[in-house]
Structures are given as structure tokens and as C-alpha cells.
Image (cartoon, grey):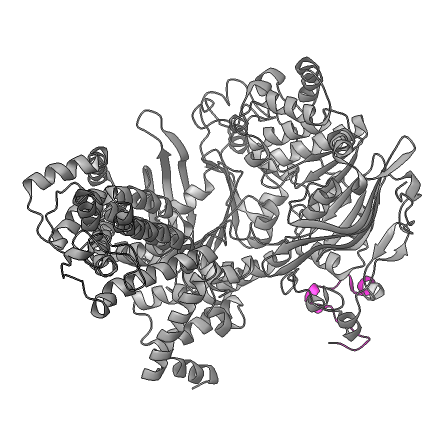
Amino acid sequence: MEETIVQQLPWSKGQAEEALLSVRDMWIEYQAARGAVKAVRGVDFDIFPGESMALIGESGCGKTTLGLGIIRLLVKTAEIKRGQVIYRRDGAAVDVRSMDEEQLRQFRWQDCAMVFQSALSAFNPVLRIRDQMYETVKAHRSASRAEVTEIAHPLLRRVQLEPERVLRAYPHELSGGMRQRVLIAMALLLNPPMIILDEPTTALDILTQRTIIDLLRALQSDFRFAMMFISHDLSLAAELANHVATMYAGCIVEYGTVNQIFYEPRHPYTLGLIKAVPTVTGDFEDLSSIAGTPPDLIDLPSGCKFHVRCPLATRRCKEEEPELMHIGPEHAAACFYTDEVERQADRAWEEIRNPQGEPL
Amino acid sequence: MSDDAVRSTTVYQRTVKDVLLGIWGSIARFFRLMARNRLGFVGFLIILFYFIVSFLGPLVMPVDNNTKVDRIFERPSWRHPLGMDHQGRDVLSQVVNGGRDILTTALLAALISTAIGITLGALASVIGGGVDNLLVMVADIFMAIPQIPLLVVLAGFVQVSSMALLALILAVLSWPGLFRAVRAQVLSLRERDYVEAAVLLDLGTGHIIFREILPNMMSYIAISFAFSMTGAIYSQTALVLLGLVPFSSQNWGVMISIAWTRGAIFYRDAAVYILAPVFTIAIFQLAMVWMTRSLEEVFNPRLRARA
Amino acid sequence: MSLASSRDVPLIEVRGLGRAFGSRRRRIWAVDDVSFRVPRGEILCLVGESGCGKTTTGKLIAGLLRPSRGEVRFEGQDIWEIERKSFKRYRTAVQLIHQDPYASLNPMQTVYEIMTAPLFRHNLVSSRAHAWERCIELFHIVGLTPPEDLLRKHPHELSGGQRQRVSVARALTVNPSFIVADEAVSMVDVSIRVSLLSMLGRLRDEFGATFLFITHDLALAKYFAWDGRIAVMYVGNIVEIADTPRLVDDPQHPYTQALLSAVPEADPELTRNKRRIALRSQDIPSLQNLPPGCRFHPRCPRFVEGLCDVQPPALLSAGDGREVSCHLVARQEAVA
């Protein structure tokens, strides 16, 4: 009997036992020539049925690795060092890490489907869409072609595609936006309670992005699946998320409801990100950049991994790495100076100063 | 002058000592890079060995030209590790001396064909249009003709008396392969952003070809060069075996030919006589192929930086 | 050979610019009848979705492509009609910054070699020591530190943001007066984008550089070109040009309106309550099979049959320095 009891996270919106998916203490490492890449370092979160969570971070923060790790689709050089991925359905709970090949096969797609970027590489270029769909379903559950076609038709119509035309087509015959919609329809073929989406709107045009975003919103409302989407695009989180987790150097540095993250950020990195992204509507606002670059995941700095770029950093930040701390209802941040962040949130990034503690 | 300026000028004042150290450093780095791929390094060492033995060996071990009728097809012994040939002459000395001509010709042929291939390939893709079409057609024609029969026909018309001429003929027959590859590569590299940047900065066609495009093809060119050499060696050996090249000089190919015609295959003891040159050539070719694995490492700065 | 003073003549002007691709039988016009001016020291943003022709326009202005129709004028002269010497002057005066930091620098060269190639080629420095100094100077301008270390490195040892700065520094070696930034910050992390844009802005403020900023990101266009203008492109045409604050606040062309309404904003209240404009169709017109009349009409919510599907609208002035290419807007203007 594997261990499926997990620690309660004080900032979770409900009891851990009610969550659809609970990730605890996830550590993933890659082997590279120079050393071990610590891509994911101690990540905890819950996803509840029907809700959407955004995992926001820039390149190299480990978010895609985390997403792939949950459904165990990592490359051979990557290893989940430790952690629990507890999935609950119909009252039963199971650790995805302990599933055997057969269970995993059914888990992927029937319980948790993944939508990748709409790039051509997400498809097999020599298979027509209908064959691709059939292969996908068959890989996870036995079904006949007729069955798959029957399920596919209404789904394709639901994503505003012409079923006949699209099923017959090859991937390169469809536009990026159409491919993304096909991928979404494919994810819904087996009606999973959870979908993970990796950069669903990146590399798409504005109008196409709008279609996809509205579509996801409508589909979630109809089918009631939980969504976890991984992106560097804050505006996507603003559109679709209930909860947002910002990720930096392999850790979640802040977790909260979408309003908390955007209007009451408590981690300097989250604050910096928000100040760096412009809006189209409204007056001109001054933006800031976060100085420096993301850390090398092989040779991480000591203490808080963000201290090198943080205007509030003190000697303590250099020596001690803060853990995610409960700071409000459904709100947590991994920083010793969340009060400072609150006090100086309205200043420009360049003007934020550390008034207390010993500066670096 | 600012501190930076002072520091920067001293960077560029080098002494002879610095230059020599620089060269030594480059050689050491070259060895280190070749060593990164084990098989490649083994191949590299073997090739090095062959060149040293073939060019310096004859000074140490001259060809044994003394006919010793009582020692025909003698078996290998400690004093004559490869035994004796049909005239009682030491086989080992023949092998040691037999490489120089073959390797020189192969080197020459590879150099000429690589030079032709690169020049024409770069020109064709940069000039484009009618010139390009013409060159491609010519290359196609050359490639369609089977090499050995063509060599046979040529040998009937041309007196192949010198190594250089032979090398030239071999080169002329093998340039199309590299030409097409270079042309394709240049056509694709021309679209790269950094080439466009060079155009914007008006750096000139010469700079673009030789400083921007070709360096990015170096590993490919080096590997093609290696294979040109192996091809040239095969061609030479074939020509000699077919008796089309009336060389009198010492040569592995000649050894095989003579051993064959002198009936070495009929004497069990004489097997070494015919096998020695065969294996010598085969091992050289194999070492060349292995060495190409290391050549990739040498020409790729991404890998070079970690050396 | 214009007699007008250089201050009156716009630095860059394109008239009726067009560029076709493909064989004689099946030509597609990636850029079709584009006209605009960029006065000295100004910023013009070229905004549009993929396939609208903005990158091709950038390359035409930079002289990397020859126009199939129309003219590109630099300081009043058609660049393809002038003699070699003048063309050479134009060549170094107009530079382009590429989008992909991983492709714009030759991986086989060191940063020093990359930087000094143009310096030596055009005799802009007298010695190696001078070249070194000049590189350090330029690196300070683009915010690259420490310059000495970076000069010795190869491109793959630098981050994306650093590479883009090297790209800009390289362009600056030849003292350009006009810079085309082709999606120059799209492939760089969000947290350093603004820093790059500020650096480009400083080039304009301190050195008087003129910019053509090409992007698909409207929010970025608004930020960077707040003091300048935005031109919106759709399938090879310009549909609207206006001063940035006016365009963003009160777009006139239905496509601009649709774009602005569709952009997701990084502000939950704002974006979830934003009024979205629904288009009549999702399909982007194919360049091989363009709709008759106005190219946007199959998707336009204000489509008027008999007017919009017959004649393509011209780019006309709509007051306040704005130009719009729409029959309905033209009608309103005529009435006003």
C-alpha cells in the first residue's frame, strides 16, 4: 500500500484529500555534461477539480520539466529524485510515481491529458489527423476506429473546426491555430478530469490567441476539467487562471489567487515580472526590467536563488533559502521580506530599496 | 590613456616567445580535442603513425633490393617479421617504403579535389543563375560516369608517368561530390541571419564566403577531405592492380599486384606477402574513418570551449 | 539630388512599395502598395500578425530585397537608382537587428571578431588598440558588462539578451542613422525585454537614431513608440497609421479595433471585463486567393455589401495626421 497521505498545505483552498492532484516535494534532475541540472527543487501544490492553475516562469525555470514530470514523460537523462504525485478519483488515491506501465498508460489521457505547443513537431507529419487521433486513443485505451470517429466529430465541431475536412488533413495543411485546436480536441477525446497545457498560445497571432483563450474558457465551463497551464505569458494567467504559481530556479516562489498575484504580489520576482509587462489599454505606464539573468541550474547560487537580482536582498537572503510561507488566505510566498514588498509595491523597480537588515 | 586602453595595447604586443608558446598551445589543444572521442583519437594516432613511418621510415629502413634466391617466400621470423617475397626480399621494408607515393598522391588528389569542389561550390551558389545551372550539369555528368571504367579508358590515352598527373586525374574525377555538397551548404548558410548581417554591414563577398560561410562548414570539409583521401587510395590501388599504371616505384598497390601475379596466393607461407599490403591499406582507411569522428570536435567551438 | 534641406526630407520614405514572391505564373504579393514616411529621429512601429508583410517591408527598407514595385527612398533618393558610392553610404546608414539572438551571430567567431570586422573593413579604426577601445565604448552604450570578458567569448557563451545587445553594438559600429528592429525583443525573456527597449530608446534620445520597430505585440509597440506612430498591416497592406496614443485610444479601422480588443492583458480585472469584438470569420485570407475589394471584408463586423467587396479602399487621411484604409471611415470623413 503506497503512501498516498500527503501533508496539508495551509494555503490550499481546501483539504488535500479533496484535491484532484497533489504534488509534494517534487525534485527532478537532469544529467548534463557539466553536471546535474536541478530543474525542479521541492515543489508543492494542489489542483482541485474544475479549477485552473497557471504555472508562470521564464526560460530555464523548470516549469516544462515539472509538467512532464507529473505525467512521467521525461527524457531518459532526467530523473525524479523524490516526491509524490497523488492523483485522486472516485474516492481512491494513487501515487503516479508508483504506477506500472499499464496503469500509467491508462492514466495518461484518460485521467490526465497533455496539450503541447501547436508546433508541427507535436504531430507525426506522415499521419492524417484522424489516424493520429486513433493512434492516441488506442495507446491509452482499446477502441475501434468507428468509436473514435464518433467521439471526434462533436469535439472538433466544438472547437470550431470542420470535422470532415480536418480529419482527412495532414498536420502541415492546417494553420498553427487550427493545429492547436486539434490538439485541444485530442486531449478531450477521453474526457479526462485534468489537462496540462504547455504554452498553448505562444507563437500564435493575436486573433488566434483570442480564439484559443475563449475556447479554453468555454470548454472548461462545459466539460468541467481542471487545467494546469504552463507559460511565460502573464496575460494568459490573467485571462484564465483561478490560481497562479510563479516559478524561479526550480521552485515555486509565490502561489496565490489570480487577483492576489496581480494586485498583491508578495515576492520580489512576481512584482518584477508584473512591472515588466505592458498593457495595451489605458495610459502609458513606465515599465522596469529585472537586472541580471536567471541562474545556472547546474551551479546555483547560495541562499535564495533570486537574491542576486533582488533589490531587497540582505545577507540573510544570501545564506538562507526561504521556503514557501503562508501569508494570507490561499496565498504563499518564499521570501523573508514580503512586508517590504507590500510596502514598496507601487514604486518603480529601480527605486525599490531595502531599508532594514544588512544589505549585500 | 585610460587603464583600459593601456591594458588593451599590451595585449597586442607579442614577442617571439609568445608566438612559439601560442603554437605549442594550439598543438596541445588540438591533441586534447582529438582525444575527446576515443575511437577518433585512436584513428588519429594510427594516421600519424602511418605518415611518420612512410616519410621517415625509408631513411631508417631502406628497401631491401637484394635478391636472395634461397629465401623465396620465407615465413615470417624475428628478423623479418613479414617474411620474404618471391625474390627473397624483405617484405617489411617494402611496406615501410611503399606508403610514401600512395599517401603523397592521395594527399595531392584530396587537396586538389577539395579546392576545386569548394571554389566551384561557393561560386555556383553565390553567383547563381546560368553559371550555377551549368556547373551543376557538368557535375552531374561527371558523377554519372563510373569511375573505374573511365580510368581504364583514360589510361589507354594518357601516359600516367608521374604521381602528380595521377593525382590530378583522380581529383578531376572526384570533385563533383564535394561540389554539390558545398553548394547545398552555402545555399542554406546564405540565408542565415549572421550572413545577412554581414551583407548589411557591407563586409564584401570575399569576407562573406571565406570568413562567414566556409568556417561554418569546416568540419564538413575536413571530413570530406578525409574521405577524398580514402577514395584516392582505392582508385590508385585499383589502377595499379589492373596494371594500368606502369609505376616502377615501390608502392603497396604494386606489392599486391606483384604478389598476385607471382603466385603468392598459392603458397601458404607466402600469404603474408599478399596480405601485408592489403591490411596496410585497409587499416589506413579504417583509421581515417575513425579519425573523422574527432574532426567534428576540433571544428566546433561550442565543444572547443570546454577543452 | 533633392534641393530641399535635409531636415524637410524624411529620412526614409516608401511609395507604392510592393514585393512579390513565386514564379511568374503564381505570384503572391507579400507587400502590396505600401507607402509611409519616417522623419529623422522618429519611431514608426510596424504592427501586424504573421504573414502581413511587416518583416518583408523591413527587409525592403534595409535593402536586403529589391522591390517588385514602388520605391524605397533614403534622404529623398531612390536607393536602387543611385550610383554605387551613394548606395554604399546608404548601406551602412540603414541597419537591421534580427529577431533570433541564436542565429544573428556567427557561432565560429569570437565577439571581438564579430565586432571588429566592420570596423576594420570600413577603416573606422586606426589600429587594433583603437578597435578594442571602440568595442568597449560601444559595449558601454548597449549596456554590456564587463566588456573585456565578453569580447573574448563565443556567441554560445552569452545569454539571449547579451547576444541581442551585441547585435545592436555591431550595428552601431558603422554609425547608422536608421535602425530596423525586426521583432528584436520577441525571443528574449520578459524580465529583460524592457531593459533592451530602454537601451534602444536611449539610442534615439542620445544619438538621434531613427527607428522602424517591427512587432506583433501591440502592448510593446505602445510602450516603445509612445512618442511615435504605429502602422497596422494586414495581408500586405497598411490599414491604419496614426500617432500611438491616438491609435491605441481611438482606433478607426475595424481590424485595428479587433486587434486591440483581442489582446489579452496582464491584468485580470481589465482583461476579463474587456469588450471583445467578434469577427465574422476565423479564416485568414490566403495570399494566393485574395478576397475582392477590401481584404478584410470577409471578417469585418462592419462589412457593407456592394461597397467593401468591390473596390479596395485607399489609404486616406482621416484628420489629425492619421491615415486609414477603409471605405466606411472615408465616408464618415467625407461627411464631416
Q: How many marks?
A: 0
Give the quadrant of residue A345: bottom right
* Stretch in magenta: A341-360
**Image location (x, y in percent) of residue C317:** 48, 39
Residue B280 makes an appearance in the image: yes
Give me the residue at 30% from left, 27% from top: C24
Q: B293 or C236, which is in the foreground?
A: B293
Residue A145 placement, left or right of B61: right
Q: Which quadrant of the figure has residue C270?
A: top right
Q: Quadrant of the C terminus of chain A?
A: bottom right
Which residue is painted at 79% across and 37% down in the image? A99
Question: Residue drawn at (61%, 33%), measured in percent from left and top?
Answer: A208
| Residue C49 part of the magenta-drawn span | no
Q: Is residue A138 left or right of residue C201?
A: right
Asked whether residue B172 appears in the rendered view, the answer is: no
Picture layout, residue C131 above or below residue C3 = below
Secondary structure mostly taken by the magenta-highlighted segment of the chain: loop
Name the residue furthest top: A146
Question: In the orientation shown, which residue stands out farthest toward the front?
Answer: B70
Find residue B109 and report its horizontal and vertical position in percent.
Answer: 21, 52
Depth order, front residue of B127/A298: A298
Vertical relation: A79 (above or below) A202: below
Picture coordinates of residue A137, whole percent (x, y): 69, 24
Does B225 appear above or below A71? below
Q: Nearer the viewer, residue B288 or C229?
A: B288
Which of A332/C57 is in front? A332
